[in-house]
Amino acid sequence: MITTWKFALLLLSLGFCQGRLRENYIDEFEEDVKVFAEPSKYGSLWPLPQKVQISQDSFRLSSSSFKIVDAKQSSAGASCSLLQDAYRRYFEYMFGIGKRQQQLNKGKRGVPSEVTELQVWITSPDTECDGYPSVSSDESYELTVAQPYAVLKAPKVWGALHGLETFTQLVYEDQYGAKSINSTSINDFPRFAHRGILLDTSRHFLPIKVILANLEVMAWNKINVFHWHIVDDPSFPYLSRTFPQLSLKGAFQPYTHVYTPADVKMVIEFARLRGIRVVPEFDTPGHTQSWGKGQPDLLTPCYSGSKPSGTFGPVNPILNTTYDFMAQFFKEVSTVFPDAYVHLGGDEVDFSCWKSNPDIQKFMEQQGFGQDYKKLESFYIQRLLDIVTTTSKGYMIWQEVFDNGVKLKPDTVVHVWIGSGSNEEMSRVTEAGFTTILSAPWYLDYISYGQDWQRYYKLKPDTLIHVWKGNQEQYQNEMAKVTSSGYKTLLSTPWYLNRISYGQDWRGHYKADPQDFTGTEAQKKLVIGGEACLWGEYVDATNLTPRLWPRASAVAERLWSAKDVTDINDAYNRLSAHRCRMVDRGIPAEPLFYGFCPHEYKGI
Amino acid sequence: MITTWKFALLLLSLGFCQGRLRENYIDEFEEDVKVFAEPSKYGSLWPLPQKVQISQDSFRLSSSSFKIVDAKQSSAGASCSLLQDAYRRYFEYMFGIGKRQQQLNKGKRGVPSEVTELQVWITSPDTECDGYPSVSSDESYELTVAQPYAVLKAPKVWGALHGLETFTQLVYEDQYGAKSINSTSINDFPRFAHRGILLDTSRHFLPIKVILANLEVMAWNKINVFHWHIVDDPSFPYLSRTFPQLSLKGAFQPYTHVYTPADVKMVIEFARLRGIRVVPEFDTPGHTQSWGKGQPDLLTPCYSGSKPSGTFGPVNPILNTTYDFMAQFFKEVSTVFPDAYVHLGGDEVDFSCWKSNPDIQKFMEQQGFGQDYKKLESFYIQRLLDIVTTTSKGYMIWQEVFDNGVKLKPDTVVHVWIGSGSNEEMSRVTEAGFTTILSAPWYLDYISYGQDWQRYYKLKPDTLIHVWKGNQEQYQNEMAKVTSSGYKTLLSTPWYLNRISYGQDWRGHYKADPQDFTGTEAQKKLVIGGEACLWGEYVDATNLTPRLWPRASAVAERLWSAKDVTDINDAYNRLSAHRCRMVDRGIPAEPLFYGFCPHEYKGI
C-alpha cells in the first residue's frame, strides 16, 4: 500500500528529526517502519552487488564439511598465499575458531541440502596474486551458490577477495542457529575504481594494530584505498631511513610513536592481501610544522617587523636546499611505497609567514610575482611535481593546486575536499580533463548530532525563535510558549522531511554522489571515485573505530554499487545487519539507532 | 605577560574554531599556548579540591614499602570491607598489578624522602561503612601528604573514598618513572550534593560489565549518583519478580538482555563501595511502550475514528487496574533499590492517543477537565505520587510534572532538562520551594562537531553566505569567491572568540552553572546539583565509554569544585592529564584535542 508506506516514511523522517529529543513516536515507529531493521530482500549484503538474484532455496553449511578450495580450472593454486590466507580468514568469519565439530554421521556428508564447497576459479592466466592492486585492477567477480558447490569466478585475485566477502555475507543463521545460504547468482564489479578512506596519523598516533584492524574492516566494505595521511603539522611519525631526524625530532615520541620501515611494510602487505592500495600523503608546503624540527632551514622563518620571530611557516620555496631535500626524500618514499601514486597535498597554504619574510619578498620581486603568493605556491609545487615525476610516480593533489593553475600531468588525480562549491569544482576539474576523486561530503570527523542552539545562548528580546521539533501538539505548545514569552516565532517542524536526520549522518553521506555535477558524459567518466576522511583532531585508538564504522560503510556502498541504489530504507535494513556483522567479527562499529544485535560487542 | 597570554587565548579560540577545518595555526599554537596541555600548578587533580596547597617538596613512593592503612585512631577497621577494598583498588591504580618488587636494600626503607604510609582516619563514631550513600552524606575529607606519613581524615567513609582518589591523583612519575608525590595539604568537600550521570539501558541494552566499568570511572570523577534510566519505550530490561512478563515480553531479548535481581544487586553494591547512589527511573505515563507488551490493559488503546487502531499510547489513567499494578510494581522497586529516592519520570507525554480514545474523552468530561489533557496527566501523576509515598520513598520528577501544577511533597527533586528557558525554570522551581537538579546543558548525547551547512544544501541565487572560518587571508579569499559567484555575504570569522569550540563541547558543559539564574540565596540553596545525561539512541557498548569520558568529567568538576573554578585553560591542562590517567587505568576516554598520552590506550 503506497499510502501507508509514504506515511511510514514521513513518520520515519519526523522520528529521526526527533532524534535530538527523546523521541516519542515509538508506537507509529513500531507499527509501520520498524526501527529494528526489517529483513531486506538482499539480506545483509553491503555494498549491494551490481546484479544479484537470491532464490528461496536454502542450503546448509557445516563447519565440519565445508571447504573453500581452488577450482580445478583456476590459474591460481596452493602457491597463491594471498588466496589461501583469504580462505582461512573467511572460513573463520563463517564458523569461528575451534568450532570444527566432529560430524556424528559421516554418511550425511553431501546430502542434497548442503553446500560443501566454494570453488574459487581465477580465470585470467595472470592472477596478479603476487602483485599490488592498482587503480586499473579488475575487481569483478561472479558468484553462483548452488548445491552441492558454489562457484566464485574472477579474472584476478582482487575480484575473488570481494567475492569471498560477498559469499560470507550471504551466509545466515536459521532459527536453530544452523548456517544457511540461499541459492544465489551474483555478477559484481565496482562503479568506481578509487574507493578510499583517509586516516590521519599525525594529530594522534594510531598504533599499528588499530590500522590493521581498520584495513580488515575496509576489506569487508570493499574499500580499496587506504589514504595514509601519515604526517602533518602536529607530528611526523614516519621513520625515514634517509632523514631519521625527521621522526626523531618531529614525532610525538621518537621510539613508541613512529612507523618504522618494518611497520610500513607490514601495513602495505596486510593491505595488499586484502586488495587495498596504500597511498601515502606527504603534504607540502603547508602542514609541515613537524618536518621543520628535524630538518633545519626547510621551513620559512617568519618575521615580526624586521626580525625573525622565532616561528616558522610553510616550506621555504626559495632555497635550492629545499628541493635537494625533497628530491632525496621522495626518492625514498617512491621505493618504500609500491603504489603508483603518492598524494602530495598542497592544501591550505597560509601566506602570512611568507609575506613577513624579506628574503621571500625579494624573491617575489625577482620572479615578477607581484603580491600574488599563489604564484609562489605554484612555483614550489611545480618544482615538487617535477621531482616526483622523476621517481616514476603519479600524484594526487588537493584541489587548491589545480585551482592555482599549476601545470599538472594528465594522469594527476585532483582531490576535491572543500564543501562549498564542490560540484562546480568537479565540473571545472573534469572539464580541464583531469581525473578526480571526491571527499567533500565525506568528512567523517564532522558529526551531525543535534545541537539545540536554544540551549546555549541567551536570547535578546527581538529574537526570532525557530520551532523545528516535536509532534503537532508539541510544536504548537512550544509556539504558544514562545509567543507568550514575547518572542517572535517561525515554524519549520512539519517541513523537515527531507532534512538529514540528526545523529544519523550516514544518511547524508549515503545520498551524496560524486557524479552529481553539471558536465558531459566524458567529464563524468573522469570521476574515479572518492574517499571518506577521518581527520585526527578528536580521534585516537580510544574512539576511532566506532566513529569510522558504520559511517564509512555508507560511502563504501555509494562508491561500489550502481548509481540507482538509493533506497534509503533498504539501505537502513542492510546496513543495520552489516553493522551487526562487523560487531560479530569483533569490531566496535557503533549503532545506527536503538535496538540490538544478535551477537553484541563484548568489549567495554 | 598579560598581553602575550591574551593573544595566546585569542589564538586558542580561533584555533579551536578552526577545528572543523584542519587548523593551520600550529606555529602560534605551539609557541604560545601548547595544545599539549601544560602542567597546571594543580597537577592532574580533577575535579579540583576546594582548598589545595601543593609545595615543591617531593617524596618518593615505593611499591614494595608503601601501604594504605587504617589510622590507629580511626573508627573504621579491618572489618570495614568498603575501605579495605578501596585500599587495594587504589594501590593497584598507583602501582599496577604484580609490580611489587623486592627491595634490594631493605635498609633504605623509610629514608627521609619516602612516603611509606597513607593513614586513613575516619573521625566520626558512625563510619557509615555498611550503609548507603545519600543526598545528605558527609563527603568531606582532609588530606595531608607529609613525610613519612600521609594522613587522610574524613568523618565518614564517603569522604575517605574521595580522598583516596585525590591522593592517587597527586602521585606522578618523575623523569625516571619513579613514583613521586609532593608535600600537599587539601581540605575538600563538594559544592553540590547531587552529582549524577544518567545512562539509558532501554534504547540499547548495556552489559553489566559496561555499567560497572563506568561506575568505576564515575568514582574517579567524584560523581555520586548513577541515574539508571532502566526502562523506556524501546525495551524493558528490568526483570521484575512481581511481573516477570514485563521483561519476558518487553526486553529486546528476554534472557540475555535483562537485568536480573542478582545483576541489579551487584550494580548497587558495586556503586555503594564507590560512594555512588543508584537512583532508578521508571518513567510513566509516557515512554512506556515496552511496558505494554507484558502487562495487558496498562496502556491506552489509541483509536482511529471510532475503532481501536491497534496501537497504544501512554499508561491508561482511567482504570483502577492501572493503579493496582503501579502500587505492586513500585512496592517491589522500593525494596529492590535501597536509595531514598526513585525517579518517576513524567516527561514528554503525548496526548494524541488519549484524545482519540472515547473512554478517555468520557472520563475527561466526568472529571470536568474540559480539553485540558494536562489535567488528566496530573490526575495520573498525583495518584502515582501518592502510591510511591506509601513506600516511604522520596521522588524525583522531570520538570513537566512541576510545570503542570501537580501537588508535590516538599522533598521532591525537580529535574530540569529542557534547554530553552532552563534558567527561568530553575527560578520558578526554587521560588516554589522545591529542590532541583539541572541537566539541560549536559545532554551528552548531543555532540557539537562542526557541520558545514554549506556542504549539504544547494544554494538559491539570493542566498546570503555567512563566512565564519579560516585565517584572515582565507576568509578574505572566501568572501571574494562568494561575491564573485554572485552571492551576498556576511562575515563572522573574527568574532567567534566567545563561541563554544567545535569538537570541544566539554567547554560548553564546563561553563554552564546550575546557579546561574535569577533568584535569592535561599533559592540558590535549593539547587542540589545536576546530572549529565547520555541517552541511548546512538550509543551502546561499542561507543558509550569514549563518548561519556572525558565529556562528563567537565560536569563533574562543575558540580564538585568551588563556583569560581572557571579558568578554562587550567581546566584544559588538568583535564588532559585526567583523561590520560583514565586511559592509563584502562578506559577508552577520548582525546580533547590532538596529542598523546604517556600511556596510550591498548585496545582497538
Image: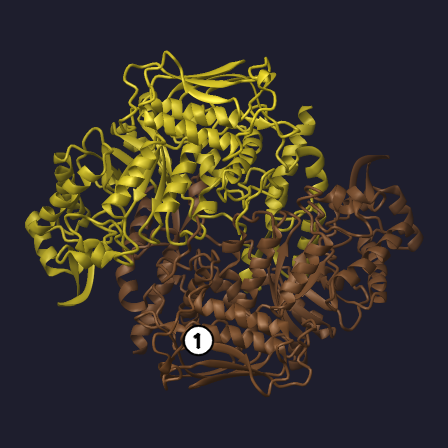
Chain colours: A brown, B yellow
Q: Position of residue A181 (x, y in %)?
A: 40, 78
Residue placed farthest to the bottom in the image? A73
**Residue A292 visible in the displayed image:** yes
**Residue A404 visible in the displayed image:** no
B552 or A7: nearer the viewer: B552
Residue that appears at 22% across and 54% down: B247
Residue placed farthest to the right in the image? A366
Q: Quadrant of the N terminus of chain A?
A: bottom left
Please determine whether, in this image, residue B425 is positioned above or below residue B167.
below
Chain on which label 1 sits: A
Specify few, some or many for label 1: CA neighbours under 10 Å numbering under 14, 14-19, or 20 or more: some
A378 or B83: nearer the viewer: B83
Q: Position of residue A590 (x, y in %)?
A: 45, 56
SS for dot 1: helix
Please determine whether, in this image, residue A295 is positioned above or below residue B537.
above
Answer with left or right where residue B164 lies relative to residue B158. Answer: right
A206 or A145: nearer the viewer: A145
Residue B344 falls in image quadrant: top left
Answer with left or right where residue A115 lies relative to residue A268. Answer: left
Residue B156 falls in image quadrant: top left
Residue carrying label 1: A170
Please determine whether, in this image, residue A412 is positioned above or below residue B558.
below
Q: Position of residue B461 (x, y in %)?
A: 58, 64
Q: Amino acid at mark 1?
A: Leu
